[in-house]
Amino acid sequence: MHQEGILGVLGGMGPQATNTFYQRIIDRTQAESDQEHLRVLIWSDAKIPDRTAGILGTPDQAEAVYQHLLADAKLLERAGCTVLAIPCNTSHYFADRLQGELHIPLIHMIRETVSAIRAMGKTTVGILATDGTVRTGIYQRAQETVREIKLGDIDPNPGQPRKSFSQQALEAAGLTPVTLPAQLQRVVMSIIYDEIKKGETGSREKFGEIDAYLRQAGCDCAILGCTELSVYRSLHSLPPYYIDAMEILAEQAILRCGKALRNV
């Protein structure tokens, strides 16, 4: 009889997203009794500094975010968790560095999502995410062996339109990334910070503007690359066109803890 893993969830980024992630774990686990569900330890630390502000701020601000994440991850490791999931896309800027200091596997939400998209045969991929995720190119560099990347490293061709390091990596993986123009990126940030994080349901009208742009740009799918957008998906009916990174993380967490997925 194989021993099932214990899932550690480093959450609180934000709390509603953590709640939604755990509900996804419950919904997607093949279980017919309480005892057939996963053992899960959730540490919802709402005091972690804002990830986008830290990454796009000073080196000291970024380091403060990292040290907070590391302390929380080690807490879960010491508590006996055998697999770690972090339902926050932007925090995966630090994922490889974190993994280097842990003795349990950290499921890399971003790489798993990109791998799933490739397996679906998609080619042109819209990215809906925070400024921190977009500008540092977390998704677009997901296929690489990651080094710590500074914002100054992102532009290899002075004088050319700035292409994030992440866009280059998606292109290397055979995918064409599409990021939003500045005015629509501000709309995404407004949905995340001014609506979902404040307990609102999120504007359908605003999301409709984003949807129209992605489809006109020729995207054959789009990544919900912020867990607040995953919350938005839970509150509104979105078509399969939108690939939910949180859903993929939940599936991988269930499988890596030795359980089967429930078909939905």
Image: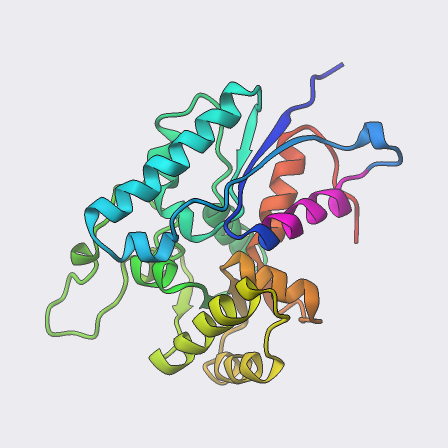
Query: Which residue sits at x=41%, y=59%?
Result: 174
Return the x and y of residue 194 as percentages of the image width and height: 49, 71
Q: Residue furthest left?
A: 158
Residues 169 and 71: in front is 71
Residue 79, magenta (yes or no): no
Query: Which residue sits at x=64%, y=65%?
Result: 233
Return the x and y of residue 212 as percentages of the image width and height: 53, 85
* Quarter residue 173 falls in: bottom left
Q: Residue furthest top?
A: 1
Return the x and y of residue 248 as percentages of the image width and height: 60, 49
Relative placement, left or right, of 62 versus 194 is left
Q: Does the rendering let one see residue 146?
A: no
Relative placement, left or right, of 131 versus 234 is left
Relative placement, left or right, of 72 versus 238 is left
Query: Which residue sits at x=65%, y=29%?
Result: 257
Q: Which residues are magenta?
A: 18-30
Q: How many marks?
A: 0
User: Which quadrant is the C terminus positioned in?
Assistant: bottom right
Residues 145 and 99: in front is 99
* Quarter residue 99 falls in: top left
As drawn, 195 above or below 217 = above
As drawn, 229 above or below 262 = below
Return the x and y of residue 109 as percentages of the image width and height: 50, 46
